[in-house]
Amino acid sequence: MKIAVWDTYVEREDGITMHFDILVPKELTDEGRIFSYGQQYLETKTFNTGALTSNECRFCHIQSVQTEVEDEIRTKGYFIVEMENCS
């Protein structure tokens, strides 16, 4: 499966910037839907964050993924890769 990687940086309430990627099927181009996936992820955190808009989240590239990631994307619609300051 080919997926689109959306590189995302969101400021936490403590001023630290979170960095994570939102992985979606490459055919999905609806930014509102992609941002809603990022917002769903942010709502699982125990701290507050700033807004998630096109200023914080941008298309980066297309790549292939491992079977486990592909399975979650098929089930949930997206997959989050935590990069920095996500906990």
Image: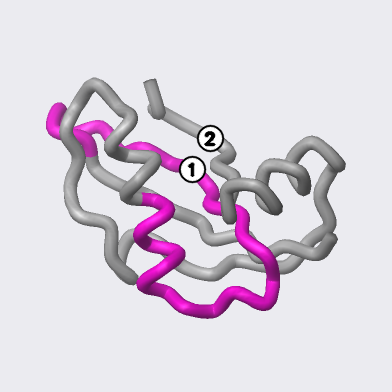
Residue 16 forms part of the magenta stretch:
yes
Residue 20 has which mark?
A: 1
Q: Looking at numbered disc 1 in the image, what kind of residue is underneath it?
A: Phe
Q: Circle 1 sits in a helix, a strand or a loop, which is it?
A: strand
Answer few, some or many: residues within 10 Å of disc 1's Cα (few below 14, many 20 plus, some between 14 and 19): many
Q: Is residue 19 above or below residue 32?
A: above
Q: State left or right for residue 26 relative to residue 78.
A: right
Q: From the image, which quarter does the N terminus lie in?
A: bottom right
In the picture, measured across the screen, residue 53 lies left or right of residue 79, that is left
Find the magenta span and give its range: 12-38
Task: Determine the CA span between mark 2 and mark 1.
Answer: 5 Å
Q: Position of residue 34 (x, y in %)?
A: 45, 64
Q: Are marks 2 and 1 in contact (CB under 8 Å)?
A: yes
Q: Say what secondary structure mark 2 lies in.
A: strand
- Tell me: 63 left or right of 48: right
> Image point 28% across, 65% down: which residue?
53
Query: On the picture, is 24 further left or further right than 69?
Result: left
Residue labelled with disc 2:
83
